Image (cartoon, rainbow, N blue to C red):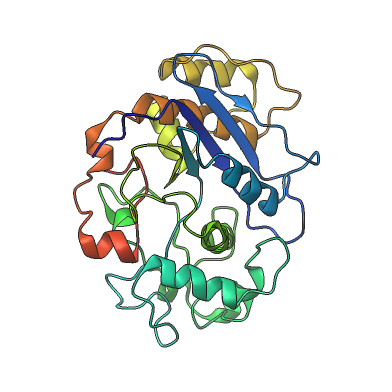
Amino acid sequence: MVPDHLTRFAAIDWSGAKGRRHKGIAVAICDSGSDAPVLVTPPDRIWSRTDVLHWLVDQAETPLLVGIDCSFSAPHVTRGAHLPGETTSTTARDLWRYVDANSADEDLGAASFLEARRGRHFYLGAADGPKRDFLHWRVCEMAGDRSTKPTTVYDAIGAAQVAKASFAGMRLLHHLADRIPVWPFDPPPAHGALLVEIYTSIAARAAGLPRGRSKMRTPESLDAALANIGSAPHDPLARYDDHATDAILTAAWLRASVARADLWQPYGLTDAVRQSEGWTFGVT
């Protein structure tokens, strides 16, 4: 089912960093049409994850498609458990509940959850053993050429790791408490907001940016990418960092992609995958 009521589009560049406020979070939003997305001003100069939670709750009744740049679950289909030997969760929502109940970090963080399980489930360095032992992927991460995600949610070291952000994102999803549907665990609603998992590099590829060189740090590079997906030039930014430009481009890509039926009904999204692992919007 392709939702036909969505007229606003937002992308959230997310962060799993420790602490209370995070320069790595950016939120961009646009309406139907071709005007470029604009950055949403955080309530206290720099976003916290809790601020994002409150902002999302405030948007619940608006016709808004929101993409969050983190993995919404861990592999389950190929392993039979999200955290083998520890969890008995069979759905992503069960995992969200478990992560939240076992994370003491401030501001919906999950770094301590990973650190307490290093070497058992998560790779945080050479002391944990061979990295290859931690390389497990979700079904959507193995689709196509297997380049949808740069790494697995069990890898918690290095610039490309998505682990801390993803498990912090699971806490956010748990605290939303069904106030906003989350695709593909929930079907698209007839009205109101909808959340999807995104990967900003998918938007970058769609905009013609080559793999490994997808970051836009000048106004010219951002406008060129926006033009490639049908967006007008952006309003000048005070600062051109990866978080802001990724969010702006991805919000425009969501707008350009929302009517594509193949993205809402991807090959490989079985009922078992849907409930236990979810899917990255944009992977076919």
Q: Is residue 107 above or below residue 199?
A: below
At 23% across and 54% down in the image, what residue appears?
269
Q: Residue 137, image x and y in percent? A: 36, 63
* Residue 242, visible in the rendered structure: no
Out of 64 and 80, give the one closest to the viewer.
Answer: 64
Q: Is residue 248 above or below residue 202?
A: above
Quadrant occupied by the N terminus:
top left
* Residue 131, visible in the rendered structure: yes
Q: Residue 109, image x and y in percent? A: 66, 63
Q: Residue furthest bottom?
A: 85
At 50% across and 38% down in the image, what residue appears?
61
At 41% across and 15% down in the image, what residue appears?
230
Out of 164 and 56, give the one closest to the viewer.
Answer: 56
Left-right relation of 53 to 8: right
Q: Is residue 69 above or below residue 210?
A: below
Left-right relation of 88 to 126: left
At 59% across and 31% down in the image, what residue appears?
28
Q: Is residue 258 above or below residue 59?
A: above
Q: Residue 119, image x and y in percent? A: 54, 81
Quadrant occupied by the C terminus:
top left
Q: Residue furthest right?
A: 44
Q: Residue 166, image x and y in percent? A: 52, 59
